[in-house]
Image (cartoon, coloured by chain):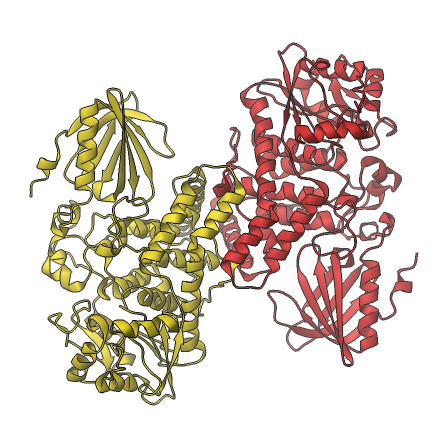
Chain colours: A red, B yellow
Amino acid sequence: MEFSEHIKTANVEEVVLRQPLHPPSRGTLCITGHHLLFSDREEGSCRQVLLLLRNIDAVEKRISGSSGTITIKCKDLQVLQLDIPGMEQCLNIARSIEILSCLDGVSEMYPFFYRPSDVSLKDQWGLSSPEKHYCQMKELHDRWRLSTVNRDHLVCPSYPPAVIVPKTTDDDTLEKAAKFRQGGRFPVLCYYHRKNGMVIMRSSQPLTGANRKRCREDEQLLQAVIDGSDKGFIIDTRSSQQALQARLTGGGFESKSSYSSWKRLHRQMERGKSLQESFIKLVEACGDGSNNMDRWLSKLENSKWLSHVQTALSTAGLLAECVERDGHSVLVHGSEGTDSTLLISTLAQLIMDPCCRTLEGFLDLLEREWVQAGHPFRQRCAHSAFSHTRLQQESPVFLLLLDCVWQMWRQFPLALGFSEALLLRLAMEAYASDYGTFLCNSHQERCALRVKENTHCLFRALLRPRERDCYSNPLYEPTELAIWPSVHPQSLQLWRGFFLRWTPQAHHLEEVQEEIRNMVTEWAKLALS
Amino acid sequence: MEFSEHIKTANVEEVVLRQPLHPPSRGTLCITGHHLLFSDREEGSCRQVLLLLRNIDAVEKRISGSSGTITIKCKDLQVLQLDIPGMEQCLNIARSIEILSCLDGVSEMYPFFYRPSDVSLKDQWGLSSPEKHYCQMKELHDRWRLSTVNRDHLVCPSYPPAVIVPKTTDDDTLEKAAKFRQGGRFPVLCYYHRKNGMVIMRSSQPLTGANRKRCREDEQLLQAVIDGSDKGFIIDTRSSQQALQARLTGGGFESKSSYSSWKRLHRQMERGKSLQESFIKLVEACGDGSNNMDRWLSKLENSKWLSHVQTALSTAGLLAECVERDGHSVLVHGSEGTDSTLLISTLAQLIMDPCCRTLEGFLDLLEREWVQAGHPFRQRCAHSAFSHTRLQQESPVFLLLLDCVWQMWRQFPLALGFSEALLLRLAMEAYASDYGTFLCNSHQERCALRVKENTHCLFRALLRPRERDCYSNPLYEPTELAIWPSVHPQSLQLWRGFFLRWTPQAHHLEEVQEEIRNMVTEWAKLALS
């Protein structure tokens, strides 16, 4: 496809840009296939603003007389305004942005065109792989094996080619268990707790249906997970009511009689549309210009976002308690096993495992639990909170994860090796990126589109020396202990750094971080000299 | 008076102390005239807890069988619990605490007994005086003079002996103006804005009464303030409705006809009982152990505390705008001129004047605007949020000031030279202290009780080298600019450091501050070596 067919006006002079935290400036606007470029040519300054069109969530135009104003609402919650002379030019620009910001074809997206000079497409893509991960975890090898039953993505389209399963379970059993789980997501290992050998498994719901179908192989697989120990827990991220209802549409849950060694716990977590609506309400509240304090607190409460944060952290806490305190293995799933399931398995690992708390370890965790494990980023992050299009599969689950991690970061400011800036960067990249990491819904899709061969990897980029400096926590002091987040309502806060990012206050907080960082750098230099 | 008559049981062994952030510990409890002392004598540890009885706001006892439990709720919001063997001992201890924590006589209070070895009562008391302040402000001398009309506290019992007034106004005029203002608080200068020569004056309400009485001398005094400039503003911290009603009880406001060069603006600020009730509701909400996020946000909203913070900051912003941006002199008053008036004049000075933002400058500001200016600390801070006694004159105006300053500190983390720890310390000291600074309601009372001769000065103590290290902001970067606080509801936050101080989270935040402080110290050492 030629992008140029969507660009009737490529350049406009004398455009005024209004952007948060900056004074208005006058300059030239330019639209390309992937970017909006604004260059300020006024005396003494030469500011350039380069905006990925993919980052634009909504465009609103207003014509008055012979000129017009376009309001651009970005997925990272920034709101820009362009005053454009000439009605036709204004309409052309708006139309181009509308079309080019919503292109469907993944291989037309910018990551397939982004070619920075200092890296090569031949560089390693990704931080690790299930194979490497297994290889490094020697303590696993006794009881666990790497299965390549999914090598062609035929058993489970959303799983990577290799997964870790009990040694005593053969591929045949896995294939049959996969047929009994929604989307083929049979139980696989996602975390091994070194201290006591207990594990976290994750899957999708079993397809018991109204007839309460059973599957011997699925039962055997889970029995093999338990092995010698007395019993395991299943954390179902739906209410028991929801789990019961799921049977009517072919889904279901593990009944006591068929899985006698497993005890089910239900914890209802919001997902899908209702989570997206909560996000939209919160962003609306944050943008409310009224000066009424009570109205703000009511709207904040009414959005329910902080309740979702609380539920996610407390369910993750429950999971970590089962594994670390009570010494049980746990299987986690809801319906599809691609959203809340990943959310709480990730948070529980952050609570228990010091290795996940370094900058590299955290990115590794995200790669494993979100990218490789098949969180459908393309569907979930197609639009953010401003879009006027009818929502389909959008849901800010990954953003909720980042918010929960931020809450932990705030509660344990010394225990995590990365900075708030990293969480902000990831929140932005998930919705619009130069990199290929968050493209596609699954490993299979990424293979089909040759994402690894044709795009650069975000996680690799974040670990280059300059970026590493910027995204690590200067106050980091590793601890071997579990870090149990408080989920008291009084302990949880609005993530102002993200939701109110484009206000002067958030900006001042960034200055403090910058100041601390400079101090540490200077200090390190002096200490070395 | 002998304290011993109130102490029937002075020592109890085998008491268990439960304190936030610490494991329970067993030891000896001892009650003295001013302190509760707990010594833990278990193997390997020798923790001592020394609590000023004056810091205790409420005592609750529960007897079960032959032992009892005393819950101690402190004015600094800490809640302690003592398990005491022996019913009689428990009742005796509770009774002693109840009586000794509420003694009325100022000269029986601990500051009159506190004698640290490293300072002498002969050391200078206080940081400055109106005389010194005037002397240093050379630019004032043209148009302003120091009047000692109040040298014997006869003209205004709550003013210091010396005040700054227009040069053209003689003492006779002042005396007559004082009779026309509630409590004799005639208009005096509290801030001179070097950039444009405009000033902030403060007073109490004029006693116009239902008959709309006038006072030529009061009008002349205010006319002399304006002098050459076109007009001044009066910020009345009551609604116009409230100001009208005040006439019925002898108070009133400056009518347009009598004060033609002055324009009145009304901004209703909460004070007195309703502010105290807001404080109590907020503390209740903070102590609510329920895990319901919505309930917490509703209670936070319902307390209205953050609305009061918003009103105070926005009224102070209005005041600073009048002076700094629009170049007018402003008179501030409400009814008595000892509460909201001081609140907003202090905040406005912090906004405009870089000198007030250093550690020393801020303490100086507090001394001038609160201690010398006659905020009735004794009445306002007699009880905090837990007390069961009938409230009389209690109102957390000074605490509201500290909260507002904290909001500014958070919004401009580099611009203030002091730390959050200072604000926390001041919040504590205002309610219970080893020092004499916050005793009494006025300069007159302090003189009568010989506070300067018989107690030590808190502000002096806070400026000793070790304290100075602890209470300065390691990231301080002075700016000459005004710092305009954002009063958008989204920009204001609960002061968790104070209201949730005794939770692990606040504790973690203190660790971060400590870490930054250490880093700066180390850095300074390295830079010097």
x and y percentages locating residue B401 in the rendered image: 36, 59
B282 left or right, relative to A223: left
x and y percentages locating residue B492 in the rendered image: 48, 57
x and y percentages locating residue B357 in the rendered image: 37, 63
Check the picture and name the quadrant holding the N terminus of chain B: top left
Along the viewing direction, whichever of B498 and A514 lies nearer the viewer: B498
A50 left or right, relative to B152: right
Along the viewing direction, whichever of B145 and B414 lies nearer the viewer: B145
Residue reaching furthest to the left: B1
Image mark count: 0
Image position of B482 with respect to B120: above or below? below
Within the image, what quadrant is residue A261 found in? Answer: top right
Question: Which residue shows up at 63% across the image and 49% down it?
Answer: A424
Residue A29 visible to the viewer: yes
Image position of A510 with respect to B22: above or below? below
x and y percentages locating residue B271 in the rendered image: 34, 61
Within the image, what quadrant is residue B136 found in? Answer: bottom left
Residue A475 visible to the viewer: no
Along the viewing direction, whichever of B494 and A511 lies nearer the viewer: B494
Question: Which residue shows up at 59% across the image and 61% down it?
Answer: A288
